[in-house]
Image (tube, helix red, strand yellow):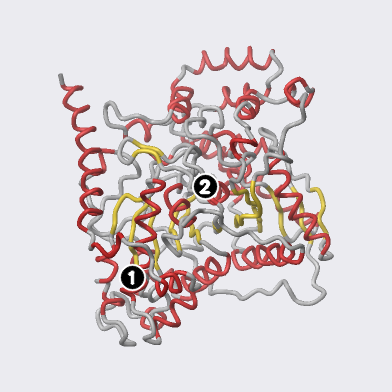
Amino acid sequence: MLFSLFSTAHWSACLRKQSERDSAIVCLPPEYKTPLSLPEQKIHALSLSQLVSECKAGQIAPSEIMLAYGKKTLAAHAATNCITDFMFEDALRIPSVANWPHSTDPESSFSLDITHDRSLLGVPVSIKDTVDIAGYDTTIGFSRNVGRPAASSSAIVRLLKDAGALVHAKTTVPAGLLGLETISDVFGLTTNPYKKTHTAGASTGGGAALLACGGSKIEIGSDIAGSVRIPAHFCGVWSLKGSVGRFPSWGTVSSMAGLEGMPIVSSPMAGSLADLEEFWKRVVMAKPWLYDHTCVPIAWRPTNLREDGMKLKWGVMMEDGTVPPTPACRRAISTVSVALRKQGHEVVEFSPPNVFDGLKIAYQLIFGDGGEQLRNSLSPNEVLTRASSSVLDLLALPRLLKRLIAYLVRKSGDSTSADLYNILHAKSEVEVRNLVDQRETYRAAWNNKWTENGLDFVLTVPHPFPAFKNGESEKVNLMTAGFTTIFSLLDYTAGVLPVTFVDKGIDQLPPDFFESQQYASMCTVAKEAYSVYDPEGMHGLPMGVQVVGRRLEEEKVLEGMKVIEDALKEQGIAFVSRVKS
């Protein structure tokens, strides 16, 4: 009887949240539900810096910007189910926005010259449903968090509001932020803006879908093992995960609070590289360490790597020791490598310290509690994806049974899967400390290898696959995210930029692939993942590359991403979104 009551409470909370969202749409002024006018299309085409400039000059009103982007947001939500909360009218009541076009903001909550200058005035910014905004729920996809609005706003939201940004929407996440698909009982399924049958990625899937549809200039997401980088790759947008402390993260909620071994970091995404860089620069220039005690006080450091004659060294990492990249994703890397070489840059194969050794450290740090925090956050009858549930089920198995399974799996020739069975269990405090010590030794090995090779950047795929079909994350599971997870463990700066699209004509597997020695040598995780690779079904989906620099090299990585885009443009290759407006 008690279980039944709790179950009813779960579904009542889900229905309540969905009803509130539907009512918010109905209550919007009717002009938000009409197509963009020609002047609105021109506003929507402006870059971030142009929006701010024209808004501050009094040439465009914030209300005009909000109307154009509000229309796009509604259309994006109708197409992909990407929004949790609509805040269009609230965005226009932000004090630094409401007194437009005056140049000062007497009600600003922070006395900073840069925010008085309103460096983000009129910029539409969406917020992942992990980031606190006063008066709104931060559900992280759990029904127990419905109806519990945040008492105060996160550091980044306060900074944004002081700087004049239009904080206009919160975006969907998977339950507990776990998995490669954005789905929860609270909000349902978020789909890829290119194909409704395919995933937008996770956990910042809602934000990536919204950006790809043009419903926002910037999304504030979060990343622990690829949560902004994988959705950016799947949806054809730009992202940059900085090192811990460089971007304000205080007030960002996690389903694994207190996780120090692999800290979650707030990370922005954008609809263009120019907007991404400009946003990063303006946030850092606003002195985020005065809003967030966890931020390091490092000023913006302009970097120019595109001077005449300057050549860079790029190390290409094509293996993570678990899942080899598919032909489509290999082609994206090859396209970039060829373009860089034609510009005279040095592109070499890079063999880093054993990647799977690092991933084993990362997985143990992430799941060191044995999944207890996630389980405790679930309401009775609340459903995770089968992929996410399988991780929790594995963690919950008795260690003796897992050792037996590991022994049998290793005997069959799959040492990778055997290792995972052996290590995924709850850890003692001493074991966690030993893992942190191993992490630092591993980081030192990477630093030495990077230095020995004289690299400027490492180039990898963000994920071995393009976006896969909804519901297939049980086969393309969390263990396929090694290419992003490893750089979170290292705390390296990592950006993703879109490059090209899946082509069913040239991205096929070899005809005898599933009978080949290459396939036979794959671990179970890789074999299951490859069973869903379908170039015909994935045809037309975007693919990106990941550009990696060392710790706290955000400016340099953004510049490296520009070097790549310049090189591609010289070859007549420029990524243009194919999302239908």
- SS at badge 1: helix
Three-letter amino acid code of the residue under disc 1? Lys
Binning the other alpha carbons within 10 Å of mark 2 as few (below 14), some (14 to 19) or many (20 upward) gives: many
Task: Determine whether, in the image, residue 12 is placed left or right of residue 570.
Answer: left
The answer to whether residue 315 is seen in the rendering is yes
Work out whether 150 lies above or below 52. above
- SS at badge 2: loop
Question: Horizontal and vertical percent for residue 232?
Answer: 54, 51
Residue at position x 60%, y 57% in the image: 495
Front residue (pair 133, 298): 133
Q: Quadrant of residue 18?
A: top left
Residue at position x 35%, y 44% in the image: 140
Work out whether 555 lies above or below 550. below
In which quadrant is the N terminus drawn? top left
Residue at position x 44%, y 54% in the image: 221
Q: First in sequence: mark 1 or mark 2?
A: 1
Task: Determine whether, in the image, residue 319 is placed left or right of residue 420.
Answer: right
Question: Horizontal and vertical percent for residue 537?
Answer: 59, 36
Question: Horizontal and vertical percent for residue 59?
Answer: 39, 85
Work out whether 441 lies above or below 60. above
Of tags 1 and 2, the one toward the viewer is: 2
| Distance from the alpha carbon under mark 1 to that under mark 2 | 32 Å
**Residue at mark 2:** 194
The answer to whether residue 438 is seen in the rendering is no
Work out whether 423 lies above or below 126. above
Q: How many marks?
A: 2
**Residue at mark 1:** 161
What label does residue 529 carry, if any?
Answer: none
Binning the other alpha carbons within 10 Å of mark 1 as few (below 14), some (14 to 19) or many (20 upward) gives: many
Three-letter amino acid code of the residue under disc 2? Tyr
* Contact (Cβ within 8 Å) of mark 1 with mark 2: no
